[in-house]
Image (cartoon, rainbow, N blue to C red):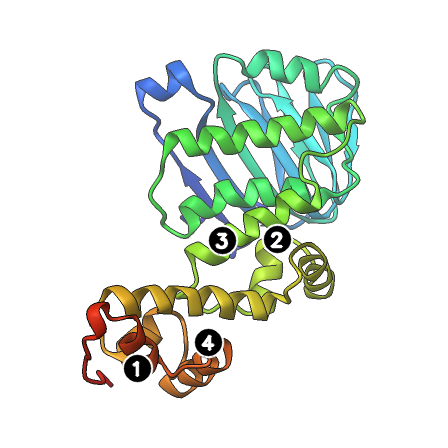
Amino acid sequence: MKVYQEGVLPESDIYFHTCSSQAKELFFYLLCTGKYFCNERYFVDRQAYDSYLILYVKKGSGYVQNGNSPLLPLDEGSVAFINCYIPHKYFTKIGWTIYWIHFDGLLAPKYFNLITEKNLILDPQNPHIIERYLQKIFNTFHEHKRVNEAIISKNIIDLLTELILVATDSESLDNPPRMIEEMLTYISENSSQKLSLPELAKQASLSPYYFSRLFKKETGYSPFEYVIQVRIDQAKFLLKTTSMPIKELAFQCGFNSVCSFCTSFKKKTGYTPTEYRIKELPNGKKMPSLM
């Protein structure tokens, strides 16, 4: 939903979530999440807002103060972890773009104390990792996905774990193999959608050039080659197990035309889709072409 607050620009979004009683007992739970584009008039000064806040600066800079802490600078790529049960303020003098979540949970105070033992501000070596975790939570609401409170809790735990590693100078959870594994799952689950290199790189929070190199290094395939292979594998399954017309099958598997599907399928398997379907029929039965 749109935001009506001084200093928050029209393209900003905020989403609220009313959690279940079970979530409050078992999970980390979300109160609200947002992506804000702000000008120099953005200023928040509260006595209390019963929750914990993780705020990541994607662009620009600002300042934060929590309780008796001094006023601390918050630069691009940095993260603030704020206890909103006590007085707090944060603002920008030049404008900024921020991702943020307000959340809580029975263990939230212990995580907060551990992560902020040295500083409220964290400076990860790879801030895109933090951004990607916050994007996952934000996009659940922004893309109108079904809200699963256990998954939301897992995403918050992953984010908190990453912040612990940043705070303790430990190796990041999100090493390249883990990230690539997540992208392989994403491609498999979204193979029927348009999956361009820029779209996949954005999902991984990497530049297209770096994502393409990393993907090839870890899988042996370019992103394009892997997407085609997943679609061909799905088509083979449907050809063997359904009588779906070839045209319908092509579009369901993510191809933008029957011609491109047939060309790609023949190149990968040595058969046309119809030949493959006949070859895979049990007992040598033949099925007419369903173009």
Q: Which amino acid, by three-letter code, is at mark 1?
A: Thr
Labels 4 and 3: the sequence-earlier one = 3
Residue 67 image offset from top left, x and y in percent: 68, 15
User: Of the residues shown, which amino acid type is indicated by label 3?
Assistant: Tyr
* Residue that carries the numbered disc 2 in the rendered image: 204
Foreground mark, 1 or 3, reads 1
Above-or-below relation of 197 to 7:
below
Instruction: Tell me if 223 is positioned left or right of 140 in this view.
Output: right
Give the labeled residue for mark 1: 274
Task: State how far apart marks 2 and 3 are (Cα).
Answer: 10 Å
Q: Foreground: 182 or 37?
A: 182
Q: Mark 2 or mark 1: name the one nearer the start of the chain.
A: 2
Q: Nearer the viewer, mark 2 or mark 1?
A: 1
| Disc 4 packing (10 Å; few <14; some 14–19; many ≥20) | few
Q: Is residue 149 left or right of residue 175?
A: left
Residue at mark 4? 269
- Say which label, 2 or 3, has the lower sequence index: 3
Task: Tell me the quarter of the picture where residue 200 sits.
Answer: bottom right
Label 4 to label 2, Cα distance in Å? 30 Å
Question: Which three-letter amino acid code belongs to the residue tagged 4?
Answer: Thr
- Marks 4/3: CA–CA distance: 24 Å
Residue tagged by mark 3? 186
Q: Residue at x 49, y 40 (%)?
A: 137
